[in-house]
Image (spheres, rainbow, N blue to C red):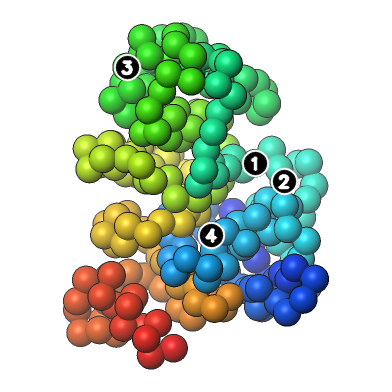
Amino acid sequence: MSIPALSVENVVVGYGGPAVIHDINLTVEPGEILGLIGLNGAGKTTLIKAILGLRHQEAGGIQVFGTDAQQKTARKKFAYLPERFEPPWFLSGEEFIEFSLSLYGEALSQDDIYTHAQSLALDPQALKKRVQTYSKGMRQKLGLLATVLTRCPLLILDEPMSGLDPKARSLVKAMLRSCKEQGQSVFFSSHILADMDEMCDRVTLMHDGVLKFTGKPAQLRSKSKGESLENAFLRFIEAA
């Protein structure tokens, strides 16, 4: 049996009071896309921050490819894109990508960077401009591009589709599928459940700080008689 890309076991996180997330257990397998869904305030971002080591866990353990997530060897194996991505505005897009890759000991030629940028409909000429001139959608594309190009075996993305139009979302989905085909694992949150249904091997549903369901999107849909994943999600939490 292969070692999971990400393993979260019995994790509890609080903020000096009652637990915000309770007894969380999940795994992301190599080459798997796992989607995290839930209402605002359900605990999704808290869970992601716990995985990153940005929130102290009161109990449980988190491993990346079999190594404690706090170890440097584990941290080198994942890259993260936050929901509110704000790159340094004084850098050009190209400089930011080069800096991001350097943190992982990676480097790409300018031509390679431009080719990947075009796959997200990000004009290579725009990469020469300072980030302060970018729209929100352009900044989001830049962040995703810099994250994917690290070639990390595990990508952790918090609302990666935020601020993107339908065409851009389609291109992002194609890029993430390509990551999966190359053996990378993707763990991401999103409120766009149609995208989750289309992309994810499995989804995990968080409500009130607890994981209520983990399985294939079709399994969740079947709980609401084959309706859309969004309707299945709403019916599920209403009954929770």
How far apart marks 3 and 4 lie (CA) works out to 33 Å
Say which residue appears at 73% left-offset and 79% top-offset. Answer: 18
Say which residue appears at 72% left-offset and 46% top-offset. Answer: 74
How far apart marks 2 and 3 lie (CA) works out to 34 Å
Say which residue appears at 57% left-offset and 68% top-offset. Answer: 43
Horizontal side of residue 12 vs 140, given as left or right: right
Q: Nearer the observer, disc 3 or disc 1?
A: 3
| Amino acid bearing label 4 | Val
Mark 3 Cα-neighbour bin, 10 Å: few <14, some 14–19, many ≥20: some
Q: Nearer the observer, disc 3 or disc 4?
A: 3
Between discs 3 and 1, the one toward the N terminus: 1
Tags 1 and 2 touching, CB below 8 Å: yes
Mark 1 Cα-neighbour bin, 10 Å: few <14, some 14–19, many ≥20: some
Q: Which residue in the protein does label 3 denote?
A: 123
| Amino acid bearing label 2 | Ala
Q: Position of residue 147 (x, y in %)?
A: 52, 34
Q: Which residue in the protein does label 1 denote?
A: 77
Q: Is residue 193 visible?
A: yes
| Amino acid bearing label 1 | Lys
